[in-house]
Image (tube, grey):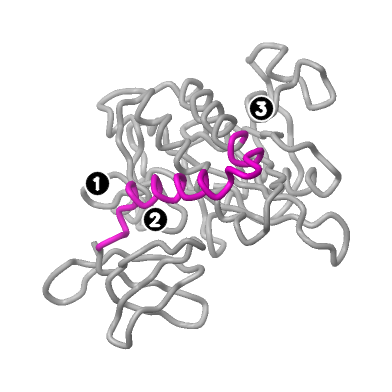
Amino acid sequence: MPDDRLAGARPGRDTTSEATRLDASSPAWRPFVSPRRYEQVASTNALLVEEARAGALEGTVLVAESQSAGRGRLGRRWLDPPGGSLLCSVLFRPRFSSEDWFLAPLVVSLAARAACAEVAGVELSCKWPNDLVALPGDLKVAGVLAEAVAEGVGGAPSALVVGIGLNCNWPDGFPPAGKEGAEIAARATSLDRLAGGPVSKKRIEAAMLAEISARWGELNGAGDSFSQLRARLLSEYRASCATLGQMVRVEMSGGSVSGRAVAVADDGRLVVAGERGAMAVEVGDVVHLRPSGPLAER
């Protein structure tokens, strides 16, 4: 999925209509639902971060068929067959406090979840902080990565780029043989394997972007209704979050904490109740553990 590094982007053959290839300078461009497409880029997130710094408009969307340097959290490699995943990055310019910017990746996650249910008939769950998974087994289907963007050196962030990599169709023989392929097979899957047949990546993309447009448009223009919409979004996320109630290990840069995930706080942090009491975790990678007996990874 998208990473935080920039390399050159190579536009490829675009088989979509002329209208969908128009950029934000065209009167036909519509925010969030008129993506610009590439056959291959190094990273959709990295490319859109640079465009955001140059003043790109909110609602700019980049979609690529493949990435040569895609990364997930902590620099992990994103490995997938070319064309098999929806690789997409979206530019947001929140009008509300930066303390609530964590809502943007929630909007993307919930929009993708709704699109998968609508188009593929597949019900996914959220895994804190940034994944969509299939139950049982917590098999990863999508990952979301958000990056704050400041325009100018030392400036305060003024935009947010949120990327998603969503496994849509895996060909026979994928994941590949070998250690890396075996690790993917044990931890991830694709929509077509969950649905029992190929799914339309274009329809999922269109449904997801329409959901993002509607949800973000309502939230970002809420004014006095913001707190009510914020609470509703958090409630929806909590209801779909497979992490809540689980025994977990949260791996952070300075160590790890284990316990039961008891809440997603109003500020988006995960509350873990362990031997030393409850702790609110702002960022980290979560491993779901077996609910009984010796703690072991699921």
From mark 3 to mark 1, how far is it between C-alphas? 31 Å
Query: Three-letter amino acid code at disc 3?
Result: Pro
| Tag 2 residue | 180
Residue drawn at (51%, 63%), measured in percent from left and top? Answer: 267
| Tag 3 residue | 35
**Which segment did they paint magenta?**
217-245
**Residue 24 position within the rendered picture, expressed as x and y whole percent measured from the top left:** 79, 27
Query: Three-letter amino acid code at disc 2?
Result: Glu
| Front one among 219 and 255 | 219
Secondary structure under badge 3?
A: loop
Judge the density around disc 3: few (<14), some (14-19), many (≥20) Cα neighbours within 10 Å: many
Residue drawn at (15%, 77%), measured in percent from left and top? Answer: 294
From mark 2 to mark 1, how far is it between C-alphas? 22 Å
| Tag 1 residue | 135
Frontmost of labels 3 and 2 is 3
Q: Quadrant of the C terminus?
A: bottom left
Left or right, 86 with respect to 136, comes to: right
**Residue 212 position within the rendered picture, expressed as x and y whole percent measured from the top left:** 55, 34
Query: Three-letter amino acid code at disc 1?
Result: Leu
